[in-house]
Image (cartoon, coloured by chain):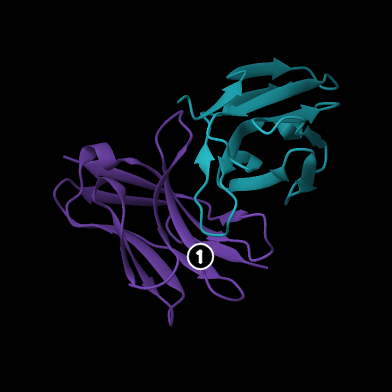
Amino acid sequence: AQSVAQPEDQVNVAEGNPLTVKCTYSVSGNPYLFWYVQYPNRGLQFLLKYITGDNLVKGSYGFEAEFNKSQTSFHLKKPSALVSDSALYFCAVRDPGGGNKLTFGTGTQLKVEL
Amino acid sequence: NAGVTQTPKFRVLKTGQSMTLLCAQDMNHEYMYWYRQDPGMGLRLIHYSVGEGTTAKGEVPDGYNVSRLKKQNFLLGLESAAPSQTSVYFCASSYSGQYNEQFFGPGTRLTVL
């Protein structure tokens, strides 16, 4: 069965510094990977996805993610963090069993401080 | 467009009571999903639907039932609520096809006493 691991429950970064939120995955077949963000008391919002092609995927709000097949990783990055980026971030992998189902990681709380 | 909406936003039940959560989407999506979110566990799929009149079990279906009588609506029912079903419930929808992202509703916070 497919799975996603987000090894850090929380990541703290100073505003203006680069940020990385880590994600590793396990899936049979080609990986289709997604990042979502959840602000307090809100639903999840789609940030970006990797389907195929370029290993560096660009998404919303200046975020990007780097796909690394040999390390089975899909880390979320941003060159310069903002306080408004503080939120809960989820990595997900598509279930190869159909129905476009997703398996989510446990989430990483990002805190950006002044 | 309203996107994905959920009714109600909050609910408190007593053990053994029943209730139905309503999800509606106005994006003409074929697929719809119900998840629950619990602290430290991420989102777990309860049931999903790939079209009107069809439903299927997800990872944690026990204690829940669903129906999709209309393409735009997906109902989640709890027949006899238990404290273990205290959670935040999210509905999502997507176009068919294996690359499409899911769009999420704002969630329903359910407490079972």
Give the residue at x 83% y 19%.
B17
Q: Judge whether B13 appears above or below B28 on screen.
A: above
Residue B112 sits above or below residue A34 on the image: above
Q: Quadrant of residue A50?
A: bottom left
Which chain appears purple? A
For image coordinates 59% across by 24% down, the residue present is B6
Whole-percent x and y of residue A18? 19, 57
Q: What residue is pinned by disc 1?
A: A32
- Quadrant location of the C terminus of chain B in the rendered image: top right
Q: Position of residue B33 (x, y in %)?
A: 65, 41
Name the residue type under label 1. Answer: Tyr
Q: Position of residue A51 (x, y in %)?
A: 45, 66
The quadrant where residue B87 appears? top right
Q: In this view of the protein, which residue sits in the foreground, A18 or B48?
A: B48
Mark yes or no: residue B47 visible: no
Q: Which chain is cyan?
A: B
Residue drawn at point x = 29 percent, y = 49 percent: A12
